[in-house]
Amino acid sequence: MRDPVYWDDAYPIALLLREAHPDVTDPSLVEPAVLHAWVIALDAFADDRATMPTEWLEQILVEWVELI
């Protein structure tokens, strides 16, 4: 089992998203609602699934783009 991740764990979440969605070649094109759904669907995600913190979604996306 992986360590739990929370909204402010942008880099670890980006790594998990890259692993979970290897077909995404340009994460900057992922809609915020889709990104939110993908983050809260991660097995390791342990934070509040009802919130949609825009600033953290943006940071996650920045980290994911930098990984590509």
Image (spheres, helix red, strand yellow):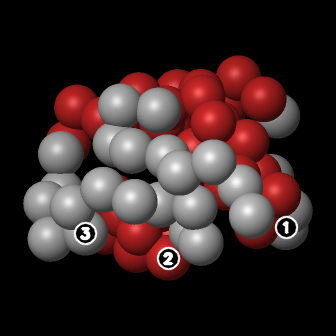
Q: Would you identify the image quadrant in which residue 58 lies? A: top left
Question: Which residue matches tag 3?
Answer: 49
Q: Mark 2 packing: few (<14 Cα in 10 Å), some, or many (20+)?
A: few
Whether residue 34 appears in this view of the structure is no
Question: Which residue matches tag 2?
Answer: 41
Q: Would you identify the image quadrant in which residue 46 lies? A: bottom left
Q: Would you identify the image quadrant in which residue 40 lies? A: bottom left
Label 1 is placed on what type of residue?
Answer: Asp
| Secondary structure category for the residue under label 2 | helix
Q: Which of marks 1 and 2 is in front?
A: 2
Residue 1 on image: x %, y %:
74, 64
Which label sits on residue 7? none
Determine whether, in the image, residue 19 is placed left or right of residue 4: right
Q: Earlier in the sequence, mark 3 or mark 2?
A: 2
Residue 15 on image: x %, y %:
73, 42
Label 3 – label 2 distance at C-alpha:
9 Å
Residue 42 on image: x %, y %:
57, 69
Label 2 is placed on what type of residue?
Answer: Ala
Whether residue 59 appears in this view of the structure is yes
Q: Earlier in the sequence, mark 1 or mark 2?
A: 1
| Secondary structure category for the residue under label 3 | loop
Question: Which residue matches tag 1?
Answer: 23
